[in-house]
């Protein structure tokens, strides 16, 4: 962890009562079932640190951080035109959506990069409701780290009963004292340890003092971890959030373990948060993931008057999405071993390699391995080829000293076991967070043909080797 808490402890500024949630970017023609959007990544500036700090130079979709919130409804088709106004190539990946391979936004693998001054149009159906997000898939550590990401919300056909539907895009920045983004992207230390963990956390692009609520209110809170590397463990002091979806996919409503909502990079959680406090109260939302480095994200600030006497008590259960159920009995099974990174002075997984060879690999930016291979770029021989329509179980084993949120494109999978024990929720995810030395089994029907990335969503790990291609043929 870097030790420069520039704004994590800055709490002097009192903010106005603006709603905590970017305005949704609604389609122009709301009546048709094809919804069209344009995203223009370009240089811009944003008041990330707030207060007396200068604005921060960023790269942003349509000039805002996060980018505009894209909203459409399950079953609709969306078309997103990306007009590249950056000085570098880019692509757009719609994280978590089960879309056709050619629309997946992986440079060289599924499309040519979008060059400066040119455009690419993505178009696909939205099979599943849920909380998703978009970001570039080219030089992601720098492009996401400079501000390119946004929420993509697919609404259920029948809206659920809540008073407000709120999105918090959680981002983490490494800012210098002048509030500018440190340009030490992809340095060897970040890449070989826990990635680029920053010093400033924003909610929807701002360091926030509070989120205004009313007693008795029921909020659906959609959390998106858009950080390069920071893992969040959020506690809502005085409140009991219920998780109703993970990575966009409905899950049996349950309280998070220990009351903490844990989200690795790339991951999402939908909460039902009942405002059980009293008018005028304040309650802290705290992130306590890194031991000894806890901080207050913001306060839930209750207005002086209640919305209703007693909060609702009926449960909110989301309708299921459309993933085929894996058939574990007939599954093909594959071992996936994650290795690499630093342990003390040594890089793990560089077996049988003298110190010189190890240093050369590290300088070449290859520090993390999936089944012994460190990826260089997005094109490579598939690590696995799966028969289309078959159930596949991947037995993942994290042999490193670090946490890895492992993300699979084009599919959602059930997390069926951890360290050999069945999971309680058999949750559908597209990103599974693996603690150091942990094993997990994931299962899915390989029903989406194409070459799909499977990688760590700590972007510095991804870019220094922890990435593979899974082919469904
Ligand atoms: Cu969110 Cu391969 O990415
Ligand atoms: Cu990782």
Image: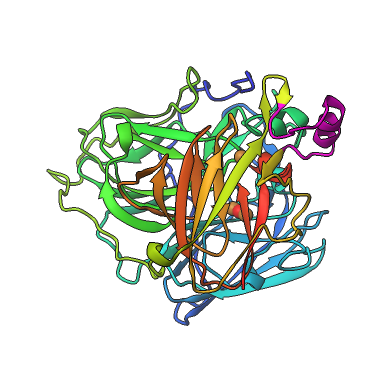
- x and y percent of residue 405 in the render? 54, 43
Left or right of 173, for residue 210: left
- x and y percent of residue 66 in the render? 58, 49
- x and y percent of residue 240 in the render? 25, 37
Quadrant of the rendered structure where residue 250 is?
A: bottom left
Left or right of 69, for residue 178: right
Look at 24% across and 40% down and name the residue there: 275
Left or right of 419, for residue 407: right
Q: Is residue 62 visible?
A: no
> Camera-side residue: 340 or 233?
340
Residue 350 is one of the magenta-drawn residues = yes
| Ligand 1's quadrant | bottom right
Span colored in magenta: 347-367
> Camera-side residue: 342 or 105?
342
Using the image, determine if residue 175 lies above or below residue 122.
above
Using the image, determine if residue 167 lies above or below residue 386.
above
Look at 45% across and 58% down and name the residue there: 443
User: Split into 4 quadrants, where in the image is the C terminus?
Assistant: bottom right
Query: What colour scheme does the image use?
Result: rainbow
Look at 27% across and 55% down and name the residue there: 162
> Camera-side residue: 324 or 180?
324
């Amino acid at each position: 962890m870097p030790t420069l808490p520039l704004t994590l402890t800055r709490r002097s500024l009192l903010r106005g009562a603006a709603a905590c949630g970017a305005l949704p970017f609604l389609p122009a023609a709301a009546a048709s079932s094809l919804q069209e959007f344009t995203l223009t990544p370009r240089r811009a500036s944003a008041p990330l640190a707030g207060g007396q700090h200068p604005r921060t130079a960023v790269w942003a979709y349509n000039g805002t951080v996060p980018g505009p919130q894209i909203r459409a409804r399950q079953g609709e088709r969306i078309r997103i035109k990306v007009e590249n106004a950056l000085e570098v190539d880019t692509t757009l990946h719609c994280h978590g959506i089960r879309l056709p391979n050619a629309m997946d936004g992986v440079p060289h693998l599924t499309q040519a990069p979008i060059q400066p001054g040119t455009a690419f149009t993505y178009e696909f159906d939205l099979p599943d409701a849920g909380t998703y997000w978009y970001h570039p898939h080219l030089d992601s550590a720098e492009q996401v780290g400079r501000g390119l990401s946004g929420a993509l919300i697919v609404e259920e056909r029948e809206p659920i009963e809540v008073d407000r539907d709120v999105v918090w895009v959680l981002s983490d920045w490494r800012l210098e004292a002048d509030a500018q983004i440190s340009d030490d992207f992809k340095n060897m230390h970040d890449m070989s340890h826990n990635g680029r963990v920053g010093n400033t956390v924003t909610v929807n692009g701002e360091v926030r003092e509070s989120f205004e609520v009313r007693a008795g209110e029921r909020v659906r809170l959609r959390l998106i971890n858009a950080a390069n590397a920071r893992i969040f463990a959020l506690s809502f002091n005085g409140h009991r959030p219920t998780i109703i979806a993970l990575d966009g996919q409905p899950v049996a409503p349950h309280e998070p373990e220990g009351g903490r909502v844990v989200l690795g990079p790339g991951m999402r959680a939908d909460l039902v948060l009942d405002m059980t406090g009293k008018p005028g109260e304040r309650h802290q939302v705290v992130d306590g993931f890194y031991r000894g480095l806890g901080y207050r994200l913001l306060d839930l600030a209750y207005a002086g008057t209640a919305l209703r006497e007693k909060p609702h008590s009926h449960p909110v259960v989301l309708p299921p999405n459309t993933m085929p159920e894996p058939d574990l009995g007939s599954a093909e099974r594959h071992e996936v071993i994650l290795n690499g990174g630093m342990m003390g002075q040594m890089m793990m997984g560089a077996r049988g390699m003298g110190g010189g060879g190890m240093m050369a690999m590290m300088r070449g930016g290859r520090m993390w391995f999936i089944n012994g291979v460190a990826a260089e770029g997005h094109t490579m021989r598939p690590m696995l080829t799966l028969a289309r329509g078959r159930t596949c179980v991947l037995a993942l084993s994290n042999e490193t000293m670090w946490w890895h949120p492992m993300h699979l494109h084009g599919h959602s999978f059930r997390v069926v076991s951890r360290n050999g024990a069945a999971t309680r929720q058999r949750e559908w995810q597209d990103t599974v967070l693996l603690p150091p030395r942990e094993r997990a089994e994931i299962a899915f029907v390989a029903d989406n043909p194409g070459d799909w990335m499977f990688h760590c969503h700590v972007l510095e790990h991804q870019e220094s080797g922890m990435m593979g291609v899974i082919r469904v043929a």
